[in-house]
Image (cartoon, rainbow, N blue to C red):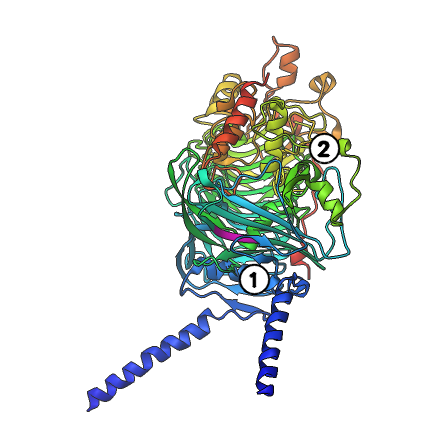
């Protein structure tokens, strides 16, 4: 009898231990050269189906997100205990080895009720390992209990009702590792894109109230070197009518294009550079001729024909879903109507 | 009894053979030098997984057969040889491609692509970006509907790369350039065939290129050596074009407007635009309805003070010229024919030079255009700049002997992947 309860206690203890270990991020799994087969192995989530992160995995949001077929995105950052990312006013923060950026792509059944009946599609991890950043995509199972590694990427059809109540059906593409690098590349090395000061400088609901994300990160010890608040750059939201049209359009291009279209990026060959700080008008597209656009030119002479959006190659490529024409090359299968409207207005307004 | 036994054998053998096939053909062995990509199951996933998980310096072997792919392939592992069973035996068709702006993208170093074909990509065929040592050998890229504007832009497309080898390739139907090397250094394009493209072979914004023993025919323009403004690498120079055949480039220009090749007249044998230090010799040019050889300045307005739009230091010698210039097209018809008459001379230089001094007394020695051809080869210097200064005296100079001379030969290109 005593023996039996000892056994029972041992089992119970083992269960408790396994629960407590589960509640920690598994640093060793993250640093392994071989990716885990299942997302759950990393311990990044306390409740993965509900996208509740483990303590120490910090959710965040971006001021201007990359458009990916209207997917909802849940973003998290993990920086190992005792280390911190270093602030930078233009580039992505320098995250220490062991850091992970987590992004889950999801679709609610109805966009008008974004928190209900959410279907998780994939969770992408950008892991900073000893040899550099590594990217893996995990695709959620039908039961939404866990996600499985997909090295070669995959396609899956997704149905949802959009903001206007219209049913949509898209062919969602989960990228492979190389396609991740198609955008996440700086000087030929895999690199994060989103977590830049100007795009993180916004409020987020932490512990039930709103905090500036950067301040919160610094307070939590995962970010260091944050300057005085008023010297941190910020991108305007694209629907913020109070912000100058020029700034909003350039912010949109910065986030949706400049990861490739910059001198250090995969789109360097074009000579079209769309970073927020680019000053040379020809370089950001003003009366710039295409180079290797092929059919992408649409028969037009300039990336941006001032005052004439519909004769501008940028607009032509944003409104296409033909793989030989569309820009960005990956990450969307539909047209971003709001982004297109913004760029159209910007070009039509241009002298 | 006999038949029963036979049947039993059959029942036993079938799954056994299937089992063997599965094991031998679908297993991808990592950490070893050779990987066979299985034709069974989802070919795109099999191949893309091999391309991602291969250890550096492996060979990935493609089976013979015809495969339909819906998404782009990409390779980012160093030292890979991707080899098929032949350019007509292993065919990757992208007719139903829904994602990706090329068929295959290579971004890793020391890569050799060999003996397979890419067909009907909506975008480019094979792109290699930022690669050191890229070899494309006995590969074919083709748009099977013939030359139409809805074809992808480039067939073979190495860009921002070093040590580029294209050997024994066949490219057909590109709506921009069949073989296009851009912003690269140390390049050899040889023994290849380009037909029914807008540009057959195009070397753009490149340093140190040898283009030789190729056939360019039924393109709009056979061989183009270009330099364009507003690009990270400019000032194209040191290119040899020799022992090629560029004939009967008779396809109407089908490039989408806006692209520079949309300005190439149908029936151009060779067009050198801008660039410095170019040697053209031993080629056969014939049956090019606009002109066999054109040497021209960049024709558009540009806003880039570091760019030089003129062809300089061009040496054209010992080529053979058949009939040409008999049915000029576009600018050759509009701007050149009224000055030279038809047929257009074999070699035409627009005579755009740098400043008034050069317009009257010729460019500096190192920038001179030197023509040394057999007797009977016709030539015109249109003297465009002089013509702008003295509009009443715009007659071209047809006297080829005034341009005679020699220039030091350009040294051959040597590639790292071909070092002994």
Report x, y in % for residue A101.
Answer: 64, 51
The span picked out in magenta is: A120-124
Report x, y in % for residue B414.
Answer: 68, 52
Figure label count: 2
User: Residue, x 39% and y 35% (percent of image)?
Assistant: A165
Rendered image quadrant of residue B253 = top left
Mark 2–mark 1 CB contact (< 8 Å): no
- Image quadrant in which the C terminus of chain A is located: top right
User: Residue, x 61% and y 8% (percent of image)?
Assistant: B392
Q: Mark 2 lies on which chain?
A: A
Q: Main secondary structure of the magenta part?
A: strand
- Image quadrant in which the N terminus of chain A is located: bottom right
* Left or right of B342 in this view: B293: right
Q: Is residue A313 above or below residue A226?
A: above
Q: In this view, does B256 lie above or below A147?
A: above
Q: Which of B317 and B4 is in front in this view?
A: B4
Report x, y in % for residue A234.
Answer: 69, 32
How far apart, in angstroms, are the residues tagged by discs 2 and 1? 36 Å
Residue with the mark numbered 1? A40
Residue with the mark numbered 2? A233
């Amino acid at each position: 009898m005593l023996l039996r309860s000892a056994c029972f206690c041992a089992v119970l203890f083992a269960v408790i231990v396994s629960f407590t270990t589960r509640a920690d991020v598994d640093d060793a799994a993250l640093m392994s050269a071989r990716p885990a087969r299942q997302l759950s192995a990393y311990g990044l989530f306390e409740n993965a189906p509900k996208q509740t992160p483990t303590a120490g995995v910090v959710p965040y949001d971006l001021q201007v997100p990359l458009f990916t077929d209207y997917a909802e995105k849940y973003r998290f950052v993990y920086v190992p205990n005792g280390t911190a990312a270093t602030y930078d006013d233009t580039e992505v923060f320098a995250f220490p080895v062991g850091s992970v950026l987590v992004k889950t792509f999801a679709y609610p059944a109805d966009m008008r009720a974004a928190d209900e009946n959410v279907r998780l599609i994939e969770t992408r991890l950008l892991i900073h390992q000893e040899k550099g950043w590594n990217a893996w995509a995990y695709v959620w199972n039908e039961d939404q209990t866990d996600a499985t590694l997909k090295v070669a990427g995959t396609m899956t059809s997704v149905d949802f009702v959009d903001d206007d109540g219209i049913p949509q059906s898209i062919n969602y593409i989960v990228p492979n590792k190389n396609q991740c690098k198609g955008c996440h590349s700086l000087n030929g090395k895999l690199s994060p894109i989103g977590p830049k000061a100007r795009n993180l400088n916004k409020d987020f609901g932490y512990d039930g109230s709103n905090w500036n994300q950067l301040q919160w990160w610094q307070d939590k010890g995962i970010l260091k070197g944050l300057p005085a608040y008023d010297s941190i750059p910020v991108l305007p939201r694209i629907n913020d009518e109070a912000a100058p049209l020029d700034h909003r359009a350039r912010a949109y291009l910065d986030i949706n294009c400049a990861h490739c279209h910059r001198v250090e990026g995969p789109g360097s060959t074009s000579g079209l550079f769309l970073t927020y700080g680019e000053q040379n008008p020809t370089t950001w597209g003003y009366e710039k001729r295409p180079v290797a656009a092929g059919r992408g030119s649409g028969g037009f002479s300039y990336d941006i024909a001032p005052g004439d959006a519909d004769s501008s190659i940028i607009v032509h490529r944003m409104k296409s879903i033909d793989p030989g024409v569309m820009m960005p090359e990956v990450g969307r299968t539909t047209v971003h109507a709001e982004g297109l409207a913004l760029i159209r207005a910007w070009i039509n307004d241009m002298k | 009894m006999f038949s029963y036994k036979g049947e039993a054998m059959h029942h036993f053998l079938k799954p056994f053979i299937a089992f063997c096939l599965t094991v031998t053909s679908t297993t991808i062995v990592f950490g070893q030098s050779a990987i066979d990509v299985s034709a069974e199951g989802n070919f795109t996933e099999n191949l893309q997984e091999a391309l991602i998980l291969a250890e550096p310096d492996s060979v990935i072997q493609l089976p013979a057969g015809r495969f339909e792919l819906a998404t782009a392939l990409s390779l980012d592992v160093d030292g890979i040889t991707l080899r098929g069973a032949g350019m007509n035996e292993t065919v990757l068709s992208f007719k139903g491609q829904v994602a990706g702006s090329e068929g295959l993208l290579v971004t890793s170093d020391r890569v050799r692509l060999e003996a397979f074909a890419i067909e009907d990509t909506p975008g480019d065929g094979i792109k290699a970006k930022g690669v050191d040592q890229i070899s494309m050998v006995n590969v074919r890229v083709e748009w099977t509907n013939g030359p139409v504007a809805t074809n992808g832009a480039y067939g073979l497309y190495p860009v921002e790369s070093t040590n580029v080898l294209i050997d024994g390739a066949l490219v057909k139907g590109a709506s921009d350039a069949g073989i296009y090397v851009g912003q690269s250094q140390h390049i050899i394009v040889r023994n290849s065939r380009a037909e029914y493209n807008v540009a057959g072979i195009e070397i753009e914004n490149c340093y140190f290129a040898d283009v030789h023993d190729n056939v360019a025919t039924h393109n709009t323009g056979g061989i183009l050596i270009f330099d364009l403004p507003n690009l990270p690498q400019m000032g194209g120079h040191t290119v040899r074009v020799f022992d090629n055949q560029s004939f009967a480039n008779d396809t109407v220009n089908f490039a989408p407007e806006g692209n520079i090749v949309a300005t190439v007249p149908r029936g151009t044998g060779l067009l050198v635009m801008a660039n410095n230090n170019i040697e053209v010799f031993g080629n056969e040019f014939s049956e090019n309805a606009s002109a066999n050889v054109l040497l021209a300045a960049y024709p558009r307005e540009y806003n880039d003070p570091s760019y030089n739009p003129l062809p300089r230091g061009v040496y054209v010698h010992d080529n053979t010229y058949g009939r040409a210039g008999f049915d000029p097209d576009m600018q050759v018809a509009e701007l050149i024919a009224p000055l030279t008459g038809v047929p257009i001379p074999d070699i035409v230089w627009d005579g755009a030079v740098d400043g008034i001094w050069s317009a009257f007394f010729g460019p500096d020695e190192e920038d001179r255009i030197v023509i040394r051809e057999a007797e009977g080869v016709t030539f015109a210097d249109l003297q465009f700049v002089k013509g702008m200064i003295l509009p009443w005296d715009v007659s071209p100079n047809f006297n080829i002997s005034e341009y005679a001379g020699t220039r030091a030969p350009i040294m051959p290109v040597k590639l790292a992947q071909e070092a002994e």
